[in-house]
């Protein structure tokens, strides 16, 4: 089975499920972003609409678009955190994802313990975790900090750890949301190489970012979202030197 | 989008099955949570035992004199043990999904994993304070092996009901934020409305109603009666099993219907 992603006219509509509460209504509402409809307790945001694209082994897709265009939503849907409310989505391959760095890490636990927990969550066996541990620690270059609580890490250190965990047991599909910028130049270079290696092994990378340079360096295709709709889906021609 | 009953049923089944299959995750997370609570303390989880002793001691001293309840200290200590176990679970269940929002929005773990994590955590905490309870009972009544077995059967019934109760309260808490304050107050008042340190005199009236229509009464009784009177409370056991079965059915359908919506409200 080859690795692939196929989205056919996928849509996602957030229902603003306002928690039932006795508090007076909050009148402030979202200004940028998707399309809001409905009123009272039944409001919707159409975050994605009629999104179609196909990716196959070796593709590195850059997701771009203004704030609220639907990038994160699309990634979360690809990961399986949310189901599309319309259209169909088929994904084959083992998926791992890096969202907001703090999502999925426990602040009180040490880096090492967080690696174990992430491993268990991803469904690795104890043995796989033990085997991967030294490599993860080495790649992250965290040194003695690996035995310090996660909350004592800087943004970049956290990003290093998150990236190392997510990529060491090479996932077939790797989803990333605008975060890699937190790593310093040296780490970004290393991470870029690893992403290339990953797609070289017939994997897929989807990277959402506002950083044009990063997208150009890493990706070979680009999907431009505008208010939840696909504005452009095209190969990215390499910049000549 | 309306869900058919079949979808609800299938969803709940998948959720619970994969939740159980991921047991290494909830065992690890439960240990982590207990660790989080006690990381900075010197006595660690021994605080749980100490806390229980303190509570039980205070109740016995305050309500103990001129009390006609047979073996009052053991009556209070056992009732309190079961009550604390259940009420703390409910208090922690209500904000469960909101507290785990980080994981719920960032991973694809089934919700039932978080439910089992809390159930496991309750069992671990219960084992610590349970050690204190056992010591007290050895002092106060020296129960026979038979009495111990019956009491532990009662505890087992409670443990079986835990995941269902946690599921229900956690879902309610996720969709209705006010629920946290409602249960918070009810649990505080419940401590006095539940026969932990009192008994009704078969005289009818409000007190007897509170006694009989309060489900906690019966969960207390299935552990306490064997210790105090050495009898197996058959009626109460049947009632508790019935309540648990009902809770499981309710939890099952709520989970099936709401599991994909929780990520949008936490
Ligand atoms: N939990 C939510 N409930 C309701 N609406 C949401 C929710 N999350 C996102 N949205 C809406 O969905 C739309 C798309 O949001 P999304 O987070 O996918 O944008 P994005 O492209 O990642 O933006 P950014 O560049 O700021 O990260 C926005 O209009 C946003 O308001
Ligand atoms: Mg985003």
Image (tube, rainbow, N blue to C red):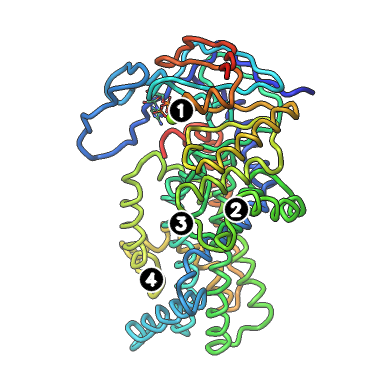
Q: Do tag 3 and tag 4 residues touch (Cβ < 8 Å)?
A: no
Residue B235, visible in the rendered structure: no
- Element marked by disc 4: loop
Label 2 CB, ligand 2: below 8 Å? no
| Sooner in the amino-acid sequence: mark 1 or mark 2 | 2
For residue B200, which numbered disc appears in the image? 4
C-alpha gap between disc 1 and disc 2: 24 Å
C-alpha gap between disc 3 and disc 2: 17 Å
**Mark in the foreground, 3 or 2:** 2
Residue B78 shown left or right of residue A238 in the figure? left
Q: Nearer the viewer, residue A237 or A53?
A: A237
Image mark 4: chain: B
C-alpha gap between disc 1 and disc 4: 72 Å
For the residues beneath circles 4 and 2, the answer to whether they share a chain is no
Residue A145, picture quadrant: bottom right
- Quadrant of ligand 1: it is top left
Mark 2 sits on what residue? A141
Q: Do tag 1 and tag 3 residues touch (Cβ < 8 Å)?
A: no
Q: Residue at x 72, y 51 (%)?
A: A132
Q: Residue at x 58, y 13 (%)?
A: A237
Q: Position of residue B163 (x, y in %)?
A: 56, 51
Mark 1 sits on what residue? A211
Q: Do tag 1 and tag 2 residues touch (Cβ < 8 Å)?
A: no
| Sooner in the amino-acid sequence: mark 3 or mark 2 | 2
For the residues beneath circles 1 and 3, the answer to whether they share a chain is yes
For residue A151, which numbered disc appears in the image? 3
C-alpha gap between disc 1 and disc 3: 27 Å
């Amino acid at each position: 089975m080859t690795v692939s992603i196929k989205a056919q006219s996928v849509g996602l509509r957030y229902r603003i499920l306002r928690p039932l509460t006795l508090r007076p209504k909050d009148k402030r509402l979202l200004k940028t972003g998707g399309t809001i409809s409905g009123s009272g307790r039944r409001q919707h945001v159409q975050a994605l609409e009629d999104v179609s694209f196909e990716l196959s082994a070796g593709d590195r897709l850059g997701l771009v678009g203004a704030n609220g265009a639907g990038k994160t939503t699309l990634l979360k849907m690809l990961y399986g955190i949310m189901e599309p409310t319309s259209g169909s989505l088929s994904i084959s391959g083992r998926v791992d994802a890096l969202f907001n760095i703090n999502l999925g890490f426990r602040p009180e636990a040490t880096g090492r313990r967080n690696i174990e927990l992430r491993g268990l969550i991803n469904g690795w066996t104890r043995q796989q975790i033990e085997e991967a541990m030294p490599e993860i620690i080495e790649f992250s270059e965290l040194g003695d900090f690996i035995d310090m609580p996660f909350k004592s890490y800087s943004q970049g250190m956290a990003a290093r750890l998150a990236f190392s965990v997510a990529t060491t047991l090479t996932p077939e599909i790797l989803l990333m949301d605008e975060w890699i910028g937190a790593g310093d130049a040296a780490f970004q270079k290393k991470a870029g190489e690893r992403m290339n290696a990953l797609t070289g092994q017939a994997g897929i990378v989807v990277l959402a970012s506002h950083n044009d340079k990063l997208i150009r360096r890493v990706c070979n295709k680009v999907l431009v979202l505008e208010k939840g709709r696909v504005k452009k889906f095209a190969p990215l021609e390499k910049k000549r030197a | 989008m309306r869900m058919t009953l079949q979808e609800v049923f299938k969803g709940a089944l998948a959720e619970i099955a994969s939740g159980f299959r991921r047991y290494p995750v909830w065992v690890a997370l439960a240990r982590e949570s207990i660790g989080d609570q006690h990381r900075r303390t010197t006595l660690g989880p021994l605080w749980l035992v100490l806390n229980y002793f303190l509570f039980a001691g205070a109740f016995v001293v305050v309500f103990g004199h001129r009390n006609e309840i047979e073996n009052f200290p053991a009556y209070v200590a056992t009732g309190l043990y079961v009550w604390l176990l259940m009420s703390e679970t409910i208090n922690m269940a209500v904000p469960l999904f909101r507290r785990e929002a980080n994981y719920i929005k960032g991973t694809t773990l089934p919700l039932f994993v978080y439910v089992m994590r809390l159930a496991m955590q309750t069992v671990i905490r219960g084992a610590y304070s349970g050690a204190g309870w056992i010591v007290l009972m050895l002092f106060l009544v020296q129960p026979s092996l038979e009495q111990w077995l019956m009491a532990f059967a009662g505890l087992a019934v409670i443990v079986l009901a835990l995941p269902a109760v946690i599921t229900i309260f956690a879902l309610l808490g996720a969709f209705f934020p006010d629920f946290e304050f409602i249960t918070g107050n009810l649990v505080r008042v419940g401590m006095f409305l539940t026969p932990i340190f009192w008994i009704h005199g078969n005289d009818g009236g409000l007190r007897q109603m509170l006694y009989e229509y309060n489900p906690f009464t019966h969960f207390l009784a299935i552990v306490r009666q064997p210790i105090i009177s050495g009898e197996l409370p058959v009626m109460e056991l049947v009632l508790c099993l019935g309540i648990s079965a009902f809770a499981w059915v309710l939890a099952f359908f709520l989970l099936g219907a709401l599991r994909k919506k929780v990520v949008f409200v936490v």
